[in-house]
Image (spheres, rainbow, N blue to C red):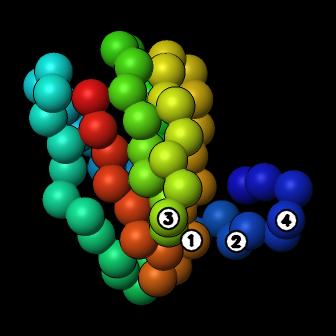
Amino acid sequence: IGGSGEPAQFHLRYFEIAPGGHTSLERHGHIHAVVALRGCGSVRLGEEVFPLSFGDVVYVAPGEVHQLRN
C-alpha cells in the first residue's frame, strides 16, 4: 500500500460529509483507507491534523485515533 510495508488487507468505506460536518472520533483494530473523491477538508490522525482534498489517500493504522472533517 505504501512505502512502509503496510499490509494490503484493509477496509474501504464511503462517506459524504456535509459542509461543517465531521465523522465520529474513532479508534478500531482494522486498517482503514480513505480516498477523497471531491471537496476538501481535513483528517485527524492521532494528535495531528492534515489537509485533505480531491485525490488524496489516507492510511489509518490499526488503533490510530482518526476523524474526517469537511
Crowd tier of the residue under label 4, counting other residues whose Cα lies within 10 Å: few below 14, some 14–19, many 20 or above: few
Query: 4 or 53, which lies in front?
Result: 53
CA separation, marks 2 and 4?
A: 9 Å
The image shows residue 19 at horizontal and vertical percentages of 16, 21
Q: Which secondary structure lies at badge 4? A: loop
Q: Which residue is mark 2?
A: 7
The image shows residue 54 at horizontal and vertical percentages of 49, 17
Q: Which secondary structure lies at badge 2? A: loop
Q: Residue at x 41, y 71 (%)?
A: 65
Query: 65 or 3, which lies in front?
Result: 65
Three-letter code for the amino acid on which mark 2 is drawn: Pro
Total tally of numbered discs in the picture: 4
CA separation, marks 2 and 1?
A: 10 Å
Q: Which residue is mark 4?
A: 4
CA separation, marks 1 and 3?
A: 14 Å
Residue 61 is labelled as 1
Three-letter code for the amino acid on which mark 4 is drawn: Ser
Q: Residue at x 52, y 31 (%)?
A: 51
Mark 2 or mark 3: which comes first in sequence? 2
Three-letter code for the amino acid on which mark 1 is drawn: Ala
Nearer mark to the viewer, of 2 and 1: 1
Res 2 seen here:
yes
The image shows residue 30 at horizontal and vertical percentages of 44, 77
Three-letter code for the amino acid on which mark 3 is drawn: Glu
Mark 1 or mark 3: which comes first in sequence? 3
CA separation, marks 2 and 3?
A: 23 Å
Residue 47 is labelled as 3
Q: Is residue 19 left or right of residue 6?
A: left
Mark 2 or mark 1: which comes first in sequence? 2
CA separation, marks 4 and 3?
A: 20 Å
